Image: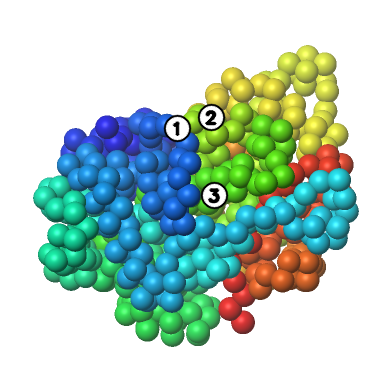
Amino acid sequence: MLTYVCVGCGATVPVGESAAQPFRCPGARAGDDVDHVLWREDEPPGPFPQNEDANPFIRYRALLAAHALALGVGASDAIFVQLVRELDDEVARVDGHGFMETPFEPSPGLAEKLGCTTGEIWVKDETGNVAGSHKARHLMGLMLYLLADSRRGGLAGLPESSEDTAVLGATTRLGLHGTEGRHPLAIASCGNAALAAGVIAGAAGWPIDVFVPRSASAAVVERLGQLSADVHTCDRLDGVPGDPCHALFRVAVTAGAIPFCCQGSDNALTIDGGKTLAWEMISAFRRSARRLWGASRLDAVFIQVGGGALASSIVQGFCDALRLGAIDRLPRFYAVQTSGAYPLKRAYDSVADRILERVPLVVEQGFSPASDRERAELMRNHPAIIDDEMRFARTHRSAFMRPWEKHPHSIAHGILDDETYDWAAVVDGMLRTGGWPLVVCDDRLMDANVIARQATGITVDHTGSAGLAGLMKAVGLDSRLAAEHVAVVFSGIDRT
């Protein structure tokens, strides 16, 4: 049965047997200082999907909450596949193309530039994804769930024959188009997420309110208007911490809007679609003609972090694959932030300090780690202490994750979130695998972007290549990386 549980307070949301929604934890209370984030508790069936359908929401459907909900209300697998294809057709009508597997390939040019002559750097290229970034993956998974949920009892009554379905006008019957009775969607974003939300909402015919900062690109605002989104410009107030767009988004949700967002703390379902990126990385690596996963495995993944949904999705997606036997160990996860704002790094350091205060080698012998790598490896060997301290951190959130005190600035504006909303999952993933967070300055971000474009020919923006900037810094700190199989995600296209 589809069930979610809050990793902060333990509240359970039995979606499969009630009208409850796995959005925000129902136990969340203002000021309780608990990190309320819902995670899926029931385990999707194995084995790891092997089919090669080009659409990731069909290939990996057995692992998705939307699929579990559809089956739970009596729909067949064939009807769910039909829903995906029809929504995808509408996405293509709005944006020019639908969802397909995005490239994940080694880049010899990047490896040479970074001196990784005996290793490989694999690039997950999201610049050609729907709306030009990875964000649409999060929101497609969420929309599929909303459509399945809006037709509870309706999906089950549809004919399974594709011929009969076409005759009856399946698009209308499956819930696409028509706004009557629908609560509006809402999202806060400075660019890519807003565009992705506009495309997916437009494809489904669902009204949406988008909250953007006054600094949002005029081209982005214009495109949102073309997508029939209601755009609300938000001003930052002096002395008031936090993102004003997110604050007004929360007001809209409280008033009844559906959180159609890329923060797992506001809607747990946003992680679901993002996991497809991790699963594609694993599938592509496994089927490479030159290797078997067990013989040559991915050793490290560098992920740029703003709000944290991308990193959280990839960490959780790899964990799913480990449970299903697709991989036999996790890679090390490294989070990359800009010197303009690094709330995740601050949270990681606070948790790490508490862990080290309990490690026997430190407490009894006075050992002091000499590097980030040494500290990470030392903590990784004490999973029980990690468990305890992450439980404490999730119930004392403000001691670890709080809004950045200054107005953040960076050329990588897409990762300038005042808070890392999905911070705990990312910190936990780094602690358990021996990775650590890196902070990079704008000069390195610009250098990384130039190298990324020259070596790969991919028109990635500075936010999208920020993970590579972190790898460039880490290679100088950890000699292992030069001989390993390392992945980076180019998460968004340069719109300039």
Which quarter of the rendering shows the N terminus?
top left
Q: Earlier in the sequence, mark 1 or mark 2?
A: 1
Q: How far apart are marks 1 and 2 (CA)?
A: 7 Å
Disc 2 designates what residue?
Answer: 325
Question: Within 10 Å of the Cα at label 3, are there few (<14), some (14-19), or many (20+) other Cα atoms?
Answer: many
Please state which amino acid type lies under the numbered disc 3. Answer: Glu
Residue 467 % position (x, y)? 68, 56
Is 183 or 146 nearer to us in this picture? Answer: 146
Q: Residues within 10 Å of mark 1 (few under 14, many from 20)?
A: few
Q: Is residue 405 visible?
A: no
Q: For the residue labelled by badge 1, is the local secondary structure a helix, a strand or a loop?
A: loop
The C terminus, quarter of image: bottom right
Mark yes or no: residue 73 visible: yes
Write down the quadrant of residue 442 in the picture: bottom right
Residue type at mark 2 is Gly
Which residue corresponds to mark 3? Answer: 280
Residue depicted at x 65% and y 47%: 288
Left or right of residue 473, residue 237 in this image: left
Reading the chain from its start, which is encountered first: label 2 or label 3? 3
